[in-house]
Image (cartoon, rainbow, N blue to C red):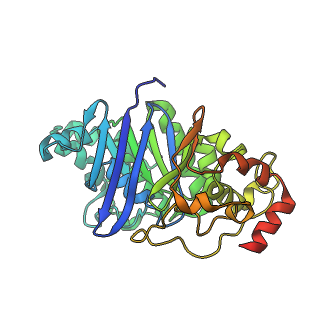
Amino acid sequence: MTDTPLLQARDLHVRFNAVRAVDGVSLDVQPGETLAIVGESGCGKTTLGRALAMLQKPSIGSISFAGTELTGLSARRLRAARRQLQMVFQDPYASLDPRQRVGDIVGEPLLIAGMAKAARQKKVAELLDMVGLGADMAMRFPREFSGGQRQRIGIARALAIEPKLIICDEPLSALDVSIQAQIVNLLIDLQRRFRLTYVFISHDLAVVRQMASRVAVMYLGRIVELAETEALFQAPRHPYTVALLSAVPTLAGTEGLVKEEILLTGDPPSPARVPLGCRFHTRCWLRKKLDDPSQCLASEPKAEGQGRHFAACHFADKVASVMRAPSLLRKSQGAA
């Protein structure tokens, strides 16, 4: 990886009337890395992914890709820039046109790019082989395939014009666990072969730990923690991240991780009515253990870092000590 980001977002906002779906996100994505974006349903991670691909126009903010500012481009120039930035969608059943044959679906980006028919057919055959389907599948319709096979078709389509970056929007959530592992291995193999960069949106932290170079944790439209993967899993600095890690059964008992589940009460607040102060304070288990939590309600914390590890919590330095004290965790659960 280089020091020059492939993708940059600065102070990115996406609003739907009063709803602040993405509320001031800044991040960099380095060439060749996988940046995972995680969080509960409704936190804004899918909207952020669509905004990064310019499928959803930002309300405010800047997105730069490979040195080109995307937010002010004309439709024609944006289409040209987007050839290097593709997306794999969450639902493999809804993302493929049921009226088209698979060869036409995978080859459509090549047709738009002006590739001749013979060359296009050869490329489609190569792409289908590449994702483990085989060239003979080109004449079939999407209804003839399983969910995992359809997701492979979606990946082949995303690869067609040789992008630099692929945004994967929860590509595993509609698949069986055994199929999920196959798709993860496929994505990792393709990344190594073609030096791809991924933005990987997911709620599955076990998969994220396997795939990601860095992890951004979203809550209520903002990134509340950003760190290299092992640093985040071994020493999270935001209480929301701790709660997410504690809820993953496959991580229970692992050295350095949360030993007991921390239960968050209630649903996240509405993004149309973001709480004053820290937006997590209404559900925060750590706040209940503080002698003076007034700062949590008084001001929204800025993301401050230790090296490459950033957390937006007034009391980030206290998270590790409380996290490793099981008796304190039990008390905080009872108080929640």
Residue 5 vs 131, above or below: the answer is above
* Direction top: furthest residue: 2
> Which is more toward the observer, 152 or 322?
322
Q: Quadrant of residue 250?
A: bottom right
Residue 163, position as x, y percentages in the image: 33, 37
Query: Can the viewer see residue 88 in this picture?
Result: no
> Which is more toward the observer, 131 or 60?
60
> Which is more toward the observer, 266 or 275?
275
- Identify which residue is drawn at 45% across, 41% down: 198
Would you say 245 lies left or right of 69 here? right
Q: Quadrant of residue 78?
A: top left
* Direction right: furthest residue: 327
- Identify which residue is drawn at 81% across, 68% down: 331
Residue 260, position as x, y percentages in the image: 79, 61
Q: Quadrant of residue 141?
A: bottom left
Residue 197, position as x, y percentages in the image: 44, 36
Residue 94, position as x, y percentages in the image: 35, 67
Residue 222 vs 285, above or below: the answer is above
Would you say 40 lies left or right of 234 here? left
- Identify which residue is drawn at 18% across, 45% down: 111
Would you say 170 lies left or right of 138 here? right
Query: Can the viewer see residue 115 in this picture?
Result: yes
What is the tally of numbered marks visible in this picture? 0
Would you say 90 lies left or right of 97 here? right
Image quadrant occupied by the C terminus: bottom right
